[in-house]
């Protein structure tokens, strides 16, 4: 039984009248990936800033790699790597100089900083550009260098704040592969994202935060199940017919679809529910134009939980 | 410093400062245009005051060019401090500050590395401006040691003023905002001063400020070092201003950094 690598307990942080965090709690098991999902302004970045010791919480407690973020910030800093949405590297330094600087500021020797820089540049396919100022790099290359900078000390805990925001699909895929291989090697990752696909793909567990509180928590399968799992979508001739169908299916929680002539029925008992629905509609002598089965996307989960699109 | 929080000690602060200073100096070397542009403005001032207005400006007991050039040097130092604000605000705007704050490095090094790099840059600029001064007829009337002391006095003033601008740089969101915030502070310090004209020609209410504000006091000290006359009574007040700025504003800037 290993203890969690990250524990957040009742974190509260306000900036004047803006309540960024209103009591956020979650845990990230060692060697697992937690996706922190939420719309802009939900408090994701504030949570990351607290966990990386950049901000001191107003209330609550956070432990990272066994160290309290307020009482032992330097110990926390020695255990973490942070990569963010900005590609926080110096444009006027070369790729190599950036990584060596981060090594030195992590109090590694000059020699091992240089060795580590060469290793990382190679691993991230940046060796050819190692001696060029970063201002000549593409967006994808900068982001790779930014992630490399977070890995200089082989940190056991990695915090990634929207690591692929603004990247093209190929670069995003590239970064996902790197993150997956780090996790395979035992790194604990906390990842904030607005991309549900990213959370679906990388995260073992997902915490949805909205307005500074945890709106839901679970695996992506559990979250999808929360809004009813599979549903049947009936397309009908017109809105009036749809209304008659809904009236006959109220006990099954049928609702009107996005198009007034469709009806959505949660298929709580799978095929049995669908058979029941078809029988009842048939009994009324109504013809179904089309029947689809629909599995909710994380997008819909997100919408139903936060009432806003990410 | 607790045992578990080692790495925040004095030796590390020095090492981290050197690492940050090296980074800033490398970045400056990579963008030499910035150094060239920061010379253009003072050169224009030299040409304007030496050849356009100079004939109409009288200063007691000296050639105007000898009075003017130390003023220009101090003006250049004073305006140079704005680079500290711009550099830090840029680092902040680009998210670099956030990364540095998450590293186990000294909490002083980002600021001290910046301020020291800017001081070295100031030193280079003052030397270049002295060459330009000699080209337009400026001459020193003391010895090399005194001239070097004069240079140190004004670079020290630039260093102290940089802490004020570090505070400004950390309080705004990007480089442009830093530039905009800096000018209203710099204008009264450099223009309502003794840098270009003798304050005795100014209205009475302005004279007190123009004679005793820190930029003028520093210029008086530099003039004493380079042109002669009583030195201690001019240099000590200038040093006190610089030390005062550093002692008050340094800790404020560090506190701002810890909380930003």
Image (cartoon, coloured by chain):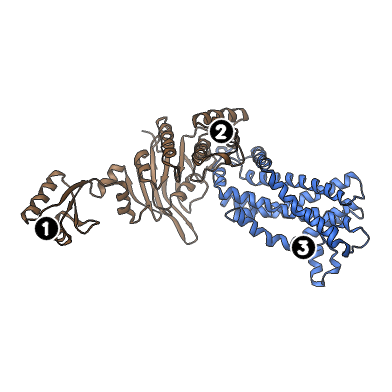
Query: Is residue A28 in view?
Result: no
Query: Mark 1 — on which chain does it sit?
Result: A
- Categorize mark 3 by other alpha carbons within 10 Å: few (<14), some (14-19), many (20+): some
Quadrant of res B29: top right
x, y (%) of residue A267?
18, 48
Badge 3 and badge 2 in a common chain: no
Query: Is residue B73 in view?
Result: yes
x, y (%) of residue A307?
33, 56
Judged by depth in the image, the label closer to the viewer, 2 or 1, is 2
Q: What numbered label is drawn on residue B85?
A: none
Judged by depth in the image, the label closer to the viewer, 3 or 2, is 2
Q: What numbered label is drawn on residue A129?
A: 2
Viewer-proximal residue among A189 and A8: A189
Alpha-carbon span between mark 3 and mark 2: 47 Å
- Whether residues under marks 3 and 2 lie with C-beta atoms below 8 angstroms apart, the answer is no
Residue assigned mark 1: A248
Badge 2 and badge 1 in a common chain: yes
Q: What numbered label is drawn on residue B191?
A: 3
Q: Residue furthest right?
A: B61
């Amino acid at each position: 039984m290993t203890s969690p690598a990250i524990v957040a307990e009742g974190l509260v942080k306000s900036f004047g009248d803006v309540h960024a965090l209103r009591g956020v709690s979650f845990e990230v098991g060692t060697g697992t990936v937690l996706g922190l999902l939420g719309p802009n302004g939900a408090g994701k970045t504030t949570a990351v800033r607290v966990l990386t010791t950049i901000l001191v919480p107003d209330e609550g407690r956070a432990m990272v790699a066994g160290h309290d973020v307020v009482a032992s910030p330097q110990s926390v800093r020695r255990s973490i790597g942070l990569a963010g949405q900005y590609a926080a590297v110096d444009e006027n330094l070369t790729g190599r100089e950036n990584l060596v600087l981060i090594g030195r500021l992590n109090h590694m020797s000059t020699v091992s900083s240089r060795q580590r820089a060469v290793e990382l540049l190679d691993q991230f396919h940046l060796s050819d550009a190692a001696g060029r100022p970063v201002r000549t790099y593409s967006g994808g290359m900068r982001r790779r260098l930014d992630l490399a900078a977070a890995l200089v000390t082989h940190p056991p805990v990695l915090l990634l704040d929207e690591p692929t925001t603004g990247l093209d699909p190929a670069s995003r895929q590239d970064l996902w592969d790197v993150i997956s291989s780090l996790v395979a090697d035992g790194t604990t990752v906390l990842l904030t994202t607005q991309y549900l696909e990213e959370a679906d793909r990388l995260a073992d567990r997902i915490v949805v935060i909205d307005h500074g509180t945890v709106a839901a928590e679970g695996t992506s399968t559990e979250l999808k199940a929360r809004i009813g799992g599979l549903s049947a979508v009936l397309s009908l001739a017109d809105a009036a017919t749809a209304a008659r169908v809904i009236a006959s299916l109220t006990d099954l929680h049928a609702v009107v679809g996005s198009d007034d002539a469709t009806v959505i029925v949660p298929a709580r008992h799978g095929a049995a529910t669908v058979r029941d629905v078809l029988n009842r509609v048939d009994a009324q002598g109504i013809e179904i134009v089309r029947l689809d089965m629909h599995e909710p996307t994380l997008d819909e989960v997100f919408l139903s939980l936060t009432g806003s699109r990410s | 410093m607790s045992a578990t929080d080692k790495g925040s000690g004095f030796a590390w602060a020095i090492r981290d400062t050197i690492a940050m200073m090296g980074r800033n100096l490398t970045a400056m070397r990579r963008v030499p245009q910035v150094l060239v542009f920061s010379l253009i403005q003072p050169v224009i001032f030299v040409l304007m005051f030496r050849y356009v207005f100079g004939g109409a400006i009288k200063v007691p007991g000296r050639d105007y060019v000898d009075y003017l050039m130390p003023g220009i040097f101090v003006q250049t130092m004073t305006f140079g401090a704005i680079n500290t604000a711009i550099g830090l605000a840029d680092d902040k705007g680009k998210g670099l500050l956030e990364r540095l704050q998450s590293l186990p490095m000294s909490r002083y090094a980002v600021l001290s590395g910046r301020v020291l790099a800017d001081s070295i840059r100031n030193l280079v600029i003052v030397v270049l401006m002295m060459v330009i001064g000699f080209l337009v007829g400026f001459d020193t009337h003391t010895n090399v040691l005194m001239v070097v002391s004069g240079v140190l006095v004004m670079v020290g003033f630039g260093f102290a003023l940089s802490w004020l601008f570090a505070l400004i740089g950390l309080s705004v969101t990007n480089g442009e905002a830093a530039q905009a915030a800096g000018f209203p502070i710099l204008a009264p310090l450099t223009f309502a001063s003794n840098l270009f004209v003798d304050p005795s020609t100014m209205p009475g209410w302005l004279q007190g400020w123009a004679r005793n504000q820190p930029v003028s006091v520093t210029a008086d000290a530099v003039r004493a070092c380079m042109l002669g006359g009583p030195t201690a009574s001019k240099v000590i007040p200038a040093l006190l201003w610089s030390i005062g700025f550093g002692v008050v504003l340094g800790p404020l800037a560090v506190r701002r950094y810890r909380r930003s």
